[in-house]
Image: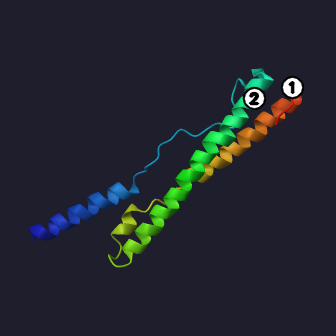
Amino acid sequence: MVSLCRVMLCFLVLTLYACGTKNKENMIFVMQSDDFHKSCNTLDQEISDIQNNEIQSLEHQKKAKVVRNTTLFYIAIPTAFLSLLFVDFTGNETQQITLYEERISHLKQISNISGCQVS
């Protein structure tokens, strides 16, 4: 009886751990209050930083998650469902990439309104 309670307690703890969010990153706002006050160089630099740093980093995280989840899935086949408790089904990277792309579009619109040349 005590052994069964311990197994159920371990299962409950693992379930609660798996349900928790792993990435509590701050989401980017597409429109920010100081966008219309930025210079052409600042707008161009922010667009470049988002394209070259943020999106590439998130793409790498997304690919790593696919590899990890696939590995865990194949491990889960012989070990039943235990490994599936650790599979990360959140789509944080995809959502952040979409928001960054919308931010780039927004900044380009501001650049056009301001008469800037955006690359």
Pointer 1 local density, CA inside 10 Å: few below 14, some 14–19, many at least 20: some
Relative to 111, does residue 8 appear above or below in the rendering?
A: below
Q: Closer to us: mark 1 or mark 2?
A: 2
Question: Does residue 22 appear left or right of residue 51 in this picture?
Answer: left
Q: From what the image shows, is residue 49 above or below residue 37?
A: below
First in residue order: circle 1 vs circle 2: 2
The amino acid type of the residue labelled 1 equals: Ser
Q: Which residue: 86% across, 31% down?
A: 117
Residue found at x 76% / y 20%: 37
For label 2, the residue is 43
Q: How many marks?
A: 2
Q: Position of residue 75 (x, y in %)?
A: 37, 72
The residue lying toward the viewer, choosing from 88 and 41, is 41
The answer to which of 55 and 76 lies nearer the viewer is 55
Indicate the position of residue 78 as horizontal and vertical percent values: 34, 79
Asked whether 31 or 110 is in front, the reply is 110
Q: Residue furthest bottom?
A: 78
Indicate the quadrant containing the C terminus: top left, top right, bottom left or bottom right: top right
Q: Are marks 1 and 2 in contact (CB under 8 Å)?
A: yes
Q: Is residue 79 left or right of residue 100?
A: left
Q: Quadrant of residue 7?
A: bottom left
Q: Which residue is mark 1?
A: 114
Q: Which mark is residue 2?
A: none
Residue 29 figure quarter: top right
